[in-house]
Image: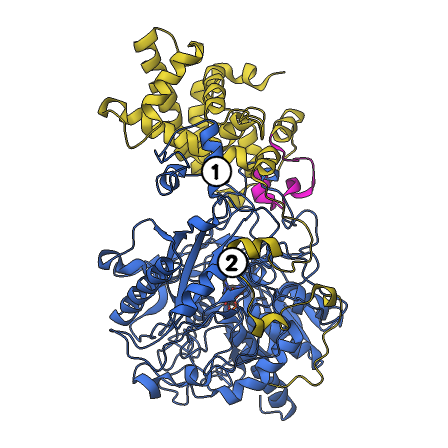
Chain colours: A yellow, B blue
Amino acid sequence: MDRRETLKTLVVGSFASSFVLTGCNPDHMEPGAVSEEEVNLGKDLGVDLDAPGHGYGRTPAEQARDEMLFSQTFFNDHEMATIAVLADIIIPADEVSGSATDAKVPEFIEFIVKDMPYHQIPMRGGLMWLDHESNRRFDKVFKDLNEEQQIEIVDDIAYPDDVAPEYQAGARFFSNIRNLVTTGFYTTRIGIDDLGYVGNQPNAWDGIPEEVQKKHNKFYRDEYKDRFLKPEEREEIEDWSGYEL
Amino acid sequence: MAFQIKEQGKEYDVVIVGSGAGGGMAAKTLSDAGLKIALLEAGPDFDSTDPAQRTQLRWPWESPRRGAGSTRAFGDFDMAYGGWNIEDEPYTQKDGSNFRWFRSRMLGGRTNHWGRISLRFGPLDFKRKDYDGKGDNWPISYDDVAPYYDKVDQLIGVFGTKENMPNEPDGYFLPPPKPRLHELYVRDSVLKMGIPMIPSRLSMLTKKLDDRRGPCFFCSQCSRGCMVYADFSSAYSLIQPTMTDGNIEMYLNAMVREVITDENGRATGVSYINKEDMKEYVVKGKVVVLAASAASSARILLNSKSRAHPNGLANSSNHVGRYIHDSTGSGMMALIPELMDRQRYNEDGVGGMHLYTPWWGNDQKHDGFTRGYHIEYWGGMGMPAYGFGFGMENLSRLVPRENGDNRPGGYGKRLKEDVRRFYGSTLGFAGRGESIPQYDNYCEIDPNTVDSYGIPVLRFHYKWTNDEVMQAKHMVDTFEEIIHNMGGIVLGEKPGPERQYGLTKPGEIIHEVGTTRMGNDKNTSVLNKYCQAHDVDNLFVVDGGPFVSQADKNPTWTILALSWRTSDYIVDQLKKQNI
Ligand SMILES: Cc1cc2nc3c(=O)[nH]c(=O)nc-3n(C[C@H](O)[C@H](O)[C@H](O)COP(=O)(O)OP(=O)(O)OC[C@H]3O[C@@H](n4cnc5c(N)ncnc54)[C@H](O)[C@@H]3O)c2cc1C
C-alpha cells in the first residue's frame, strides 16, 4: 500500500505530528517493531532499518526517533511532485551523472524536513509561493507548466544578486531548496561518484601523488623526507630501544 | 517508603568515578598494581567493533539525514553519546554567562571522539606566572611530569617529529604521515612569515605498539571510533584490555551523586543512581578517585555536603569550582583558487591535520595579551555529508568561469560544474589558545534546579578578559595574512571587535579544566601536588580539575600523565598504609 495514499487525508495530522516531533524527549524513547513499509522507505534512502543499530550505529533512543520519523508523512503528493520537478531542474542528468530524482533526492527532502522541523514552513510555504506565481502568470500550478514556463519563473528567483523585490520570497525559497537538493544529491553513491571522492576505505597513505606535486609545484622538504612514515613499515611493532629524547 | 539507598556489602580498594581519559588511566594503573576496583560510569557500554554501534566506514547515505547533527552535536557518525545539551541533565547560567558544556555519556567518555591532538605542556607552561605575573604557577614542574609523558607516549602511541623547539617538548614519536596538498600550500605561506609549521602530534598508531591495536588504515574517521583500535580511546586502549585481569568491576549507567564520608570526614565510597531502575545505591571503597571530567567532579564534591563538610567535600578553601577555564578559539576559512579543479585521489589520511603550527611568539611582545595559541588546519577532498554544497552561490561569485561568468546562484549543469570545480579548494584555520584562569570564573550548585536523577545541577559564571579577546584578534589577523600570502581568498567576513574577533564562547573548545586546582597552599587550592584533596587524604581527582593553567595545548595528554602519576602515588601510599 502506498504510504501517501493512507496518509493523504491526514495533512492536518502531519502538521500536528511535527509539533509532537519537537516536543518529545528522544532520550526516553524505546525502539519498537519496524513495519515493512518503514523498512522500504528506509531502503529508498539507503538506510537499513532491519540491521542492528539501523545499520549506522544508532542508540536505542535514536532508533526510536528514526522510526517515529519514518512513520510520518509531511509533504502531500502534489508537493512531492513539485519537489521532484524542481529537484531535476536544479540537478539534471548530464554527461557525468544522473539527476536528483535518480538519486532519490525528493525522498531525502521528505525525511529531512521531519528531522529538522524548521525547514517545514519555509518549504511548504515556498512551494505555495511557486504555485501562486505560476497561477498568476500562466493560470496553472508549477508542475503542470511546460519547461519554458518553469524556467522563466526559476530564472527570476535563482540568482540572489539580481532579484526583483516582488520575487524576494521566492528567491529565498529557491536558495533553500537548492541547498537541500545539492546536499541530498552529493551525499548519495551517484553524487559521490560524480564528485570523484575515492576515500572511505582502508588504504596506506603515502603522500601526494608525484604528478600532483609537480603540477602544483609543492614538494616535501628534504629535512623531513626520511622521517615520514614508510607505509611498508606499518605492520612492524615499534621498537623504542635506542630512541633518545 | 519504598525508596531506600541500597548498600553493597563489598568494599573495594578503589572506587573510580568516570571512564574517560583520567578514569581509564587510573583504572589501568591501579589494576596493574593488583588493586580491586569499582569503576562507575554514567553512560552505557561502548565497543567500536559492535555492528550495532559502529559508524566507521559508513557512507553518508546510510544515515537518512546524511550524517547531520540532529541527535549528535557533531553529526550522526560522531562517537559521542551526549553533546552540548542532554535532556536529562540540564545546567544553568549566572549573570548573563553563556558557558557551553559538552558531555559524552558512554564508556570512554569524550575520548571516543576527541581530536587526538596530543601535546605535552612545556617547562614554561607550568610556570607562567613567573613569566607574565598573571594567574598562578603550578606546584610541580615539567620535570615532575616528563617521566609520565614518556610512559603515556609508549603505552598509547603518538606520532610526531623531534623538533627541539623551546617549550614544545619532544616525545616518543611514531613516524608521522606525509602532509596533504592544501597543507603544503599553508606551509609555504607561513614559513615565509617566519611562523613554524611541523608534523602534527596525534595519538594514532601509524605503526603498531603491540598485536592488539592498529595500525591506522587512513580513513580520517577517528572521531567515529576505530574498529582496529588504531587511535586512543580510554574504552579500547585502556579499559577493555585491562578488564581481562579481573580486578575491575564495572558499573555502567551509574550516575554518581556524591561521595559518602564517615564521621571523621574520610571518604568511604560513593552513592549513585542506577539509570536502569532509578534507584540509589552505595559502593564502598578505601580510596575514592574522581574522574568524571573537571566540571562533573566539582559538582559531585559540591553536592557531597555533610556535617563535617558543610560546603561540600574537600572545599574548606571554597575553591571547588573556581578557576574553571577553557581554551580560547577563533577561526577563518579560505578558498585557494589554485586548488580548484583538482585531480582526484584519496587524501583522507588520519583523522586530523598532518601539519600544525605550535606557538611561535613566546619571546615577542604582543598587543594586549601575554599567552600563546597554536594553529590547527583542516581542508581537502573530504567525504560529503549533510551541508555539503550549501551556499554554492557564495563561492561562484569569487572565481569566474573561463567565459568570465561569475553570476552567483543558478541551477542545472552549471551548478553541477561549480560543485566539481570548487570541491577540495577550501580550507580552514583554528587558533587554540591559553586563557588566564580567573577566580571569578566558576561553577557552583544551582540550588533551584535538579536533573532527572534528583541531583542538583551546575550553574556557570564565566567572562573572558581582555587578554583572551586580544589574543583572538591576533589569531584572525594572522590567518588573514597567511591566506593572502598563499593567494587565497578569505571566506565570510573577518570578525571585528563587535564579535570579539570571533572568540568562541567559554566551554566551546571543550577543554574546561581547573575546577579543583592543585597547590601547596590549602587556602587557595583544593588538591595537593599529587591530586590528593587537602581536606580528605583518601580522595583524589584525576581529570582536568587539578590544572592550575592549561597552556595553549590540548589537555588530554597531561590528564593522562597526571592520572598515572597520581595512581602511582595511591599505590605507594596504600603500601605505606598512609591512607
Ligand atoms: C570534539 C572534541 C574534540 C576534542 N579534541 C581534543 C584533542 O584533540 N586533544 C585533547 O587533548 N583534548 C581534546 N578534547 C578534550 C578531551 O576529550 C577531554 O580533555 C578528555 O576527554 C577529558 O577526559 P576526562 O577523563 O576528564 O573526562 P571525559 O572524557 O569527559 O570522561 C568523563 C566520564 O565520566 C562520566 N561521568 C560524568 N559524571 C559522572 C557521574 N556523576 N557519575 C558517573 N560517571 C560520570 C562521563 O559519562 C564520562 O564518561 C576534545 C573534546 C571534544 C568533545
Q: In the rendered view, would you say A66 is above or below B244?
A: above
The local secondary structure at tag 1 comes to helix
Label 1: few (<14), some (14–19) or many (≥20) C-alpha neighbours in 10 Å: many
Measure the C-alpha gap from mark 1 to mark 2: 25 Å
Q: Is residue A19 visible?
A: no
A47 part of magenta stretch: yes
Q: Residue B449: image x %, image y %? A: 37, 57
Disc 1 designates what residue? B419
- Taking the image as shown, residue B16 lies to the left or right of residue A181, namely right
Of residues B480 and B236, the one nearer the viewer is B480
Q: Residue A90: image x %, image y %? A: 46, 26
Which amino acid type is marked by label 1? Val
Of the 4 image quadrants, the one containing the C terminus of chain B is bottom right
Return the chain for callout 2: A
B409 part of magenta stretch: no
> Which range of residues does the magenta coloring cover?
A45-64
Mark 1: is the Cβ under 8 angstroms from ligand 1?
A: no
Disc 2 designates what residue? A217
Q: Is residue B180 visible?
A: yes
Q: Residue at 36%, 35% (x, y): give it.
A: B404
Q: Residue A210: image x %, image y %? A: 61, 57
Return the chain for callout 1: B
Q: In the rendered view, would you say A36 is above or below B145?
A: above
- Taking the image as shown, residue B314 lies to the left or right of residue B148, namely left
Which amino acid type is marked by label 2? Asn
Q: Residue at 62%, 42% (x, y): give it.
A: B59
